[in-house]
Amino acid sequence: MSKNPSHSYSSSSDEAPDPFDVMIEKTGCMSHHIAVMECMADHRDWRKCQTLLKEFKICMANSKNSPIKTNASNS
């Protein structure tokens, strides 16, 4: 199987949605998550994606539906 199931942004009708993607969708931070994943794919170095990672962290921390509760001011 060549498809990475944890980051499938398109789904066919016979596949169940990935639980991780469903969780991120509920937070309203999917656009941030996609931006981080695209940056990682482009640069292959997480250090070059720090700004996007911080924005994603803040979005997740501010979301009522996020299972991740952090102090966004510590970033």
Image: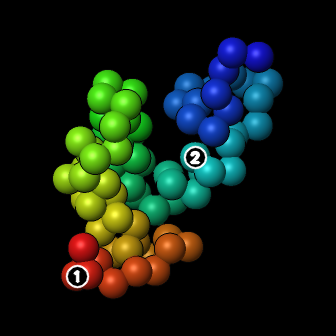
Q: Amino acid at mark 1?
A: Ser
Relative to 29, is 13 above or below? above
For the residue labelled by badge 1, is the local secondary structure a helix, a strand or a loop?
Answer: helix
How many badges with numbers are in the image?
2
Q: Amino acid at mark 2?
A: Asp
Name, please, the residue furthest toward the top: 2
Q: Quadrant of the N terminus?
A: top right
Q: Which mark is residue 73?
A: 1
For the residue labelled by badge 2, is the local secondary structure a helix, a strand or a loop?
Answer: helix
For this rendering, which residue is in front, 42 or 4? 42
Crowding at mark 2 (Cα within 10 Å: few <14, some 14-19, many 20+): some
- For residue 68, side relative to residue 14 (left or right): left
The percent position of residue 13, horizontal first and vertical second, equals 73, 24
Q: Residue at x 46, y 80 (%)?
A: 69
Q: Quadrant of the C terminus?
A: bottom left
Is residue 31 visible in the rendered image? The answer is no
Is residue 32 visible in the rendered image? The answer is yes
The percent position of residue 48, horizontal first and vertical second, equals 23, 42
Is the C-beta separation of discs 1 and 2 under 8 Å? no
Q: Residue at x 40, y 80 (%)?
A: 70
N-terminal of the pair, mark 1 or mark 2, is 2
- For residue 74, side relative to residue 15 (left or right): left
Residue on which disc 2 sits? 21
Q: Which mark is residue 62?
A: none
In space, the residues marked 1 and 2 are separated at their CA atoms by 26 Å
Image depth: mark 1 or mark 2 in front: 1
For this rendering, which residue is in front, 25 or 48? 48
Relative to 35, is 32 above or below? below
The percent position of residue 60, horizontal first and vertical second, equals 40, 66
